[in-house]
Image (spheres, helix red, strand yellow):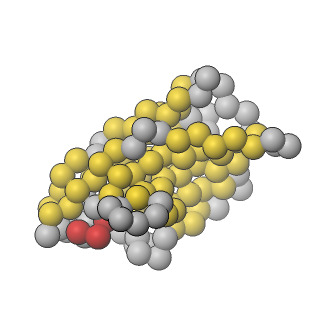
Amino acid sequence: QVQLVESGGGLAQHGGSLRLSCAASGTLFAINAMGWYRRAPGKRRELVAEMDSDGVSQYADSVKGRFTLSTDKVEKTVALQMNSLKAEDTAVYYCHINEGAELRYDYWGQGTQVTVSS
């Protein structure tokens, strides 16, 4: 059974920084993508940053230049360094891993709250 455990959320001031970490337990085969999503109050879940199996990363336009994704397939860890935080970054952040070949599976963390005060 695969479980993703997140840490590092909390309260930050406008312009501050936070680092989110996620560690996966269990066996993962053929990881296709590792990254972070978020859901702000009253909004749909959205992609924040994700890296595919070729090592190519994509970021939401709203976080480009401020957030940096790092992943380690061997250690099964995903981290998100968030700098220059804004109030609009306030959301619950979810770690995500997609794995599999013919059949693909999505795994999600429990979510960690990030609150940015203006």
The image shows residue 19 at horizontal and vertical percentages of 32, 49
Q: Nearer the viewer, residue 118 or 44?
A: 44
Residue 15's spot in the image, x, y percent?
Answer: 19, 68
Which quadrant of the figure contains the N terminus?
A: top right
Query: Hey, which residue is sitting farthest bottom in the picture?
Result: 61
Question: In this view, which residue lies farthest toward the right?
Answer: 102
Q: Which residue is drawn at 40% across and 66% down?
A: 43
Q: Is residue 46 left or right of residue 54?
A: left
State whether residue 39 is above or below residue 10. Answer: below
**Number of numbered discs visible in the structure rendering:** 0
Quadrant holding the C terminus:
bottom left
The quadrant where residue 104 appears: top right
For residue 82, what is the image quadrant?
A: bottom left
Q: Name which residue lies at 18% across and 52% down.
A: 11
Left or right: where 64 falls relative to 34: left
Percent position (x, y) of residue 78?
49, 44
Quadrant of residue 25 within the rendered picture: top right
